[in-house]
């Protein structure tokens, strides 16, 4: 299939965007996606854009911007999964645009287009497009900030303002640690290129002042909700400062494992996480990094390329040394990974192209076989339609794109990722979500009893919070239930372990039962439809008589 190279890449990007958009119409997954969506729902229902609440209590973990964006979308489109996901999807497009601009500014258009293709088809971005959290926002705002600060070297003050605005947006999504991937590359670039005086220029200090000004809405909200109310109990103690948590405990506290939220660090965690998270490009990426060790290879890239690999390296090391690690953190530096991989791919000679041509083909075949087997094992709806679609895209890729070339590698690998999107968004995730009991219960209640005031007893479910009508109340004891039992028509969502008590004490009537499994912690017995019933739990919607 002969198409001008850059035109081919542009067509592939458009196809990826269309395929990615199908994720907008899927439901929300617990824990984080449904949790964030439920907090934004409460924000709209209470018409309170300052305080963050979860399960009837003040919530202090993430900054506000994720929830402000989702709540604004709810105001326009109504409270729905689509409205929650849309701002993140648009942020992803913004990130791709700025990735293109930044790469083109340092390299050329071909490398820029390839870097966008690599970024938009990486496995973890595919997952994040469906299971929407905060990382897509951070990634987009960080690369936008880096681009504008890069342009601020050559052009006027407007790029300092724009760069600071996007840096502030990233901070109001995650916290001040995001300034590390923004500025680390520039600091190392100035040191290597001996531009020591650059750091003393007023524009960079003005940039920091502007960042502080732009994050003032976040600081105000935290101060009002927590610092003005030391009597509130947060993390099991009083006198918790929202500002201290924002500037220290949320980020440095996790890094040093001294804050209220702790974890266990593993230096090798992000090395093996990248192997699967950056598929189908991880082999190419690690090879590109290995090649940077040789000075002759570093000499082939522009001096400004230091900004890219230094930003990625410093961030990767900090992530790896941190005591609190989650796989989706790595998404933050996928734009840098994509540029490094694209630049390496564009430098490849015929022998290297031939090697990676074979590797990508083997990956396509292996992943197609794996997904087909999973479709049968899990017993997704219409499994043969699913497998037929996977095989169709495999055959299409090998028939339309032939010859050992970078174009063929990119085209086949892109179609592999589109194949994966179709499998996840249209078959696997919808089948998986059938076992997210809170979502199913909330939807059923909204359809059958839309005016019902729902309560959750001795449990929690962020998906139920989001999908159930109105604000959901939480009862953590039977004493609390005693105070509410006079509320006629009250419906309670309860785990099976508590149902026998309700049936005995309150003559509870079952409205509907729902199968449950923790779908983000998949196990073999659950994946196998023949043994699935052995590991399922059950939740009930009951009416108190």
Image: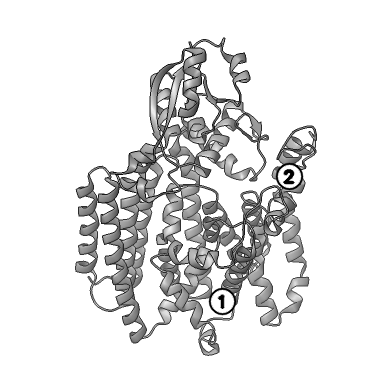
* Residue at the image position 48 percent from the left and 28 percent from the top: 497
Give whichever of 532, 513 is nearer the camera: 532
Q: How many marks?
A: 2
Q: Quadrant of residue 53?
A: top right
Q: Residue 217, how many percent across, how many down?
A: 70, 43
Task: Please give left or right for residue 54 compared with residue 237 in the image.
Answer: left
Could you say where residue 317 lies in the image, as x and y percent from the top left? 61, 69
Query: Mark 1 — residue?
Result: 305
| Residue found at the very far bottom of the displayed protein | 296
Whether tag 1 and tag 2 are in contact, CB under 8 A, the answer is: no
* Camera-nearest residue between 4 and 348: 348
Q: Residues within 10 Å of mark 1 (few under 14, many from 20)?
A: some
* SS class, disc 2: helix
Q: Earlier in the sequence, mark 1 or mark 2?
A: 2
Q: For residue 115, which quarter of the picture? A: bottom left
Q: Residue at x 69, y 77 (%)?
A: 190
Q: Name the foreground residue: 197 vs 130.
A: 130
Label annotation for residue 219: 2
Mark 2: give few (<14), some (14-19) or many (20+) Cα within 10 Å.
some
Residue appearing at x 55%, y 40% in the figure: 36
Provide residue 260's location: percent of width, then percent of height: 70, 47
Task: Work out whether 405 lies above or below 544.
Answer: below
Classify the position of the N terminus by image quarter. bottom left
Asked which quadrant contains residue 477, the reply is top right
Q: Is residue 226 visible to us here?
A: yes
- Left or right of 496, for residue 355: left
- Can you say whether 67 is above or below 410 in the image? above
Is residue 153 visible in the rendered image? The answer is no
Element on which disc 1 rests: helix
Q: Kindly report the distance in space between the C-alpha atoms of the residues bearing marks 1 and 2.
A: 35 Å
Q: Is residue 297 above or below residue 306?
A: below
In percent of width and height, residue 166 lies at 62, 55
């Amino acid at each position: 299939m002969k198409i001008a190279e850059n035109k081919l890449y542009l067509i592939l990007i458009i196809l990826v965007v269309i395929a990615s958009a199908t994720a907008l119409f899927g439901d929300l997954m617990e824990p984080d996606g449904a949790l964030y969506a439920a907090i934004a729902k409460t924000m709209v229902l209470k018409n309170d854009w300052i305080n963050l609440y979860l399960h009837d209590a003040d919530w202090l973990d993430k900054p506000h911007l994720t929830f402000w964006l989702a709540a604004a979308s709810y105001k326009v489109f109504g409270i729905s999964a689509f409205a929650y996901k849309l701002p993140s999807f648009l942020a992803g497009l913004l990130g791709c645009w700025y990735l293109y601009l930044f790469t083109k500014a340092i390299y050329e258009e071909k490398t820029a287009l390839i870097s966008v293709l690599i970024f938009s088809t990486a496995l973890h971005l595919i997952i994040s497009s469906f299971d929407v959290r905060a990382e897509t926002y951070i990634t987009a705002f960080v690369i936008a900030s880096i681009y504008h600060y890069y342009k601020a070297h050559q052009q006027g003050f407007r790029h300092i303002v724009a760069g600071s605005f996007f840096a502030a947006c990233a901070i109001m999504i995650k916290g001040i640690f995001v300034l590390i991937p923004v500025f680390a590359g520039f600091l190392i670039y100035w040191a290597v290129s001996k531009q020591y005086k650059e750091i003393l220029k007023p524009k960079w200090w003005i940039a920091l002042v502007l960042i502080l000004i732009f994050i003032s809405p976040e600081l105000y909200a935290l101060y009002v909700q927590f610092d003005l109310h030391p009597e509130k109990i947060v993390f099991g103690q009083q006198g918790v400062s929202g500002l201290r948590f924002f500037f220290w405990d949320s980020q440095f506290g996790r890094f040093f494992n001294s804050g209220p939220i702790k974890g266990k660090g593993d230096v090798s965690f992000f090395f093996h996480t990248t192997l699967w998270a950056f598929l189908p490009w991880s082999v190419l990426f690690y090879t590109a990094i290995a090649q940077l060790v040789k000075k002759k290879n570093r000499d082939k890239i522009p001096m400004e390329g230091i900004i890219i690999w230094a930003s990625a390296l410093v961030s990767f090391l900090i992530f790896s040394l941190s005591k609190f690690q989650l796989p989706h953190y790595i998404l933050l530096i996928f734009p840098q990974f994509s540029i490094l991989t694209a630049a390496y791919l564009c430098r490849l000679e015929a022998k290297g192209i031939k090697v990676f041509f074979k590797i990508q083909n083997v990956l396509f075949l292996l992943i197609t076989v794996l997904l087909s087997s999973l479709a049968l094992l899990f017993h997704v709806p219409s499994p043969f339609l699913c497998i037929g679609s996977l095989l169709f895209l495999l055959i299409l890729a090998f028939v339309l794109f032939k010859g050992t070339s970078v174009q063929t590698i990119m085209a086949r690998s892109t179609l592999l990722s589109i194949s994966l999107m179709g499998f996840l968004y249209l078959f696997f995730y919808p089948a998986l979500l059938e076992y997210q009991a809170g979502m199913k219960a909330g939807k059923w209640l909204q359809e059958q009893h839309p005016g019902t005031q729902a309560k959750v007893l001795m449990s929690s479910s962020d998906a139920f919070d989001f999908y159930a009508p109105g604000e959901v109340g939480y009862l953590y004891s039977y004493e609390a239930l005693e105070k509410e039992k006079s509320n006629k028509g009250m419906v309670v969502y309860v785990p099976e372990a508590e149902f026998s008590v309700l049936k005995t004490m309150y003559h509870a009537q079952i409205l509907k039962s729902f199968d449950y499994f923790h779908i983000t912690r998949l196990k073999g017995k659950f994946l196998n439809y023949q043994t699935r019933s052995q590991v399922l739990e059950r939740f009930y919607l009951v009416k108190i008589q």
